[in-house]
Image (tube, rainbow, N blue to C red):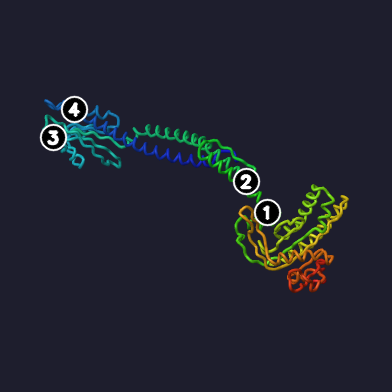
């Protein structure tokens, strides 16, 4: 398992960061809008207090000094850029800029302010600067309008007032991001530890280690997944054991064809080459030695011979006592199955010579075997009962091979091949023809061939 920060944790931290940023952006927008509206409302309240002060300076007689004082005090307020007082006709009677006293503001904002009977706020541009004008009517009684007060403030003043709040929001967002990323990485890294265990175990399985087991105690779906994973490993071990067992008797390709269901088991007619080998005098040999020795030497013998069968991609059909029945071409057919079977027989002869040398060194008598090879049509399929079945071959070809093998005793030979097999390998081997050999169960005699060995290169040319 790789050390370091989990990549999943990093991905989750990115997602959490995006969520925090989005939420904080929405909250910041709402807070800034609310703050902006609060500042404008605050300026509106100031304008209303200004209007009350001006009304006291207008009655019972206008007091120019008091009006001027009120205007100057108003512009001292933070963010206020101008302040003025209008009479009931809209003429300026006091202004923070003295030169504008006595004038009429003929702008659209001025006209609306002079004619309003309720507080209004008007945004407008002055020299490319965003300003807000608040006009508050000076009402006497319920219906008499004595004049209007106006104050102005700029967007810059609002922006400046929001700078500190914006900084605080940024600091809070940054702190939340850092905390969120840290907690996310810690939590997700802790949560994905079981996943990392499973990933590490899967990598070990990929390298062929089927002894790995995963222990997770999280009391959730991950624990269930671990149990399923362990069950899967057990199934793979069982399957691997089956493959290995098959691999002892058939080639890897045949074993996989059987396990993967590519091999038809219902039964079909096929052309195949049958090889049957048998130990000569096995009964007399086994009577002279202990049962344990019989099992030991048979296992050694079978191991040597089956390796040869597998080498040439034949299928070990079964052991019949001390006999070996191998089939070439039923499960995984090749164009040269007859050739493969004959080469197997020749190499079995060589391996037997080597094995006999070992036996002689051990003070044991040598073994002699008889081999028959015959090519013909067989019925291949799964045969047996509901309690036990096996993939095997049956038919006259198999029976004839068995009868041919027994003729080795009569002709003092060790390998006999049928004419059908010989015709497919005649350019490969040297033989001695045995013409018109009577076969039990056959009306006509057959031509058989005693296999001497491979042709040398010059003779084949």
Helix, strand, or loop for circle 1? helix
**Distance of label 4 from label 2 (alpha carbons):** 88 Å
Residue in the foreground of this view, choosing between 162 and 229: 229
Query: Which of labels 1 and 3 is toward the front?
Result: 1
**Distance of label 2 from label 1 (alpha carbons):** 21 Å
Residue 181, horizontal then vertical, whole percent: 48, 36
Query: Which of labels 4 and 2 is toward the front?
Result: 2
Residue 306, horizontal then vertical, whole percent: 74, 56
Name the residue beneath numbered marker 3.
Answer: 88
Name the residue beneath numbered marker 1.
Answer: 246
- Quarter of the rendering occupied by the N terminus: top right
Residue in the foreground of this view, choosing between 204 and 181: 204
Q: Is residue 326 left or right of residue 238?
A: right
Helix, strand, or loop for circle 3? loop
Residue in the foreground of this view, choosing between 349 and 442: 442
What label does residue 205 carry, if any? 2
* N-terminal label among 4 and 3: 4
* N-terminal label among 2 and 3: 3
Query: Which of labels 4 and 1 is toward the front?
Result: 1
Query: Which of labels 4 and 3 is toward the front?
Result: 4
Name the residue beneath numbered marker 4.
Answer: 52
Relative to 312, say whether 99 is above or below: above
- Quarter of the rendering occupied by the C terminus: bottom right
């Amino acid at each position: 398992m790789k050390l370091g920060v989990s990549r999943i944790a990093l991905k989750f931290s990115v997602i959490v960061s995006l969520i925090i940023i989005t939420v904080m952006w929405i909250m910041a927008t709402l807070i800034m809008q609310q703050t902006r509206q609060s500042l404008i409302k605050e300026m509106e309240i100031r304008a209303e207090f200004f209007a009350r002060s001006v009304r006291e300076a207008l009655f019972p007689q206008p007091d120019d000094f008091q009006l001027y004082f009120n205007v100057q005090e108003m512009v001292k307020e933070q963010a206020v850029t101008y302040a003025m007082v209008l009479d009931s006709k809209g003429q300026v009677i006091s202004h923070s800029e003295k030169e504008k006293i006595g004038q009429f503001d003929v702008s659209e904002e001025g006209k609306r302010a002079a004619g309003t009977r309720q507080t209004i706020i008007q945004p407008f541009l002055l020299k490319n600067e965003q300003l807000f004008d608040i006009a508050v009517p000076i009402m006497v009684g319920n219906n008499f309008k004595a004049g209007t007060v106006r104050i102005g403030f700029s967007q810059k003043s609002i922006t400046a007032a929001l700078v500190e709040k914006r900084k605080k929001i940024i600091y809070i967002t940054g702190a939340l991001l850092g905390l969120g990323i840290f907690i996310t990485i810690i939590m997700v890294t802790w949560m994905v530890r079981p996943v990392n265990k499973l990933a590490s175990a899967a990598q070990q399985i990929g390298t062929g280690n089927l002894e790995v087991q995963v222990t997770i105690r999280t009391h959730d779906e991950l624990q269930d997944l671990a149990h399923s994973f362990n069950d899967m490993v057990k199934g793979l071990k069982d399957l691997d054991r089956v493959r290995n067992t098959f691999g002892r008797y058939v080639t890897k390709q045949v074993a996989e064809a059987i396990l993967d269901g590519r091999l038809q088991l219902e039964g079909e007619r096929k052309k195949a080459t049958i090889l049957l080998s048998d130990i000569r005098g096995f009964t007399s040999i086994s009577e002279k030695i202990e049962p344990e020795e019989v099992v030991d030497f048979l296992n050694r013998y079978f191991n040597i011979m089956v390796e040869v069968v597998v080498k040439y991609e034949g299928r070990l059909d079964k052991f019949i006592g001390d006999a070996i029945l191998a089939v070439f071409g039923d499960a995984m057919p090749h164009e040269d199955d007859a050739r493969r079977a004959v080469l197997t027989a020749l190499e079995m002869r060589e391996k037997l010579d080597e094995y006999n040398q070992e036996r002689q060194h051990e003070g044991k008598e040598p073994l002699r075997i008889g081999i028959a090879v015959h090519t013909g049509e067989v019925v291949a399929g799964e045969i047996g009962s509901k309690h036990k079945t096996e993939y095997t071959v049956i038919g006259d070809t198999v029976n004839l091979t068995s009868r041919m093998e027994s003729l080795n005793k009569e002709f003092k030979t060790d390998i006999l091949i049928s004419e059908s097999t010989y015709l497919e390998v005649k350019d490969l081997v040297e033989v001695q023809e045995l013409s018109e050999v009577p076969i039990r169960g056959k009306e006509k005699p057959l031509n058989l061939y005693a296999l001497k060995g491979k042709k040398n290169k010059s003779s084949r040319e």
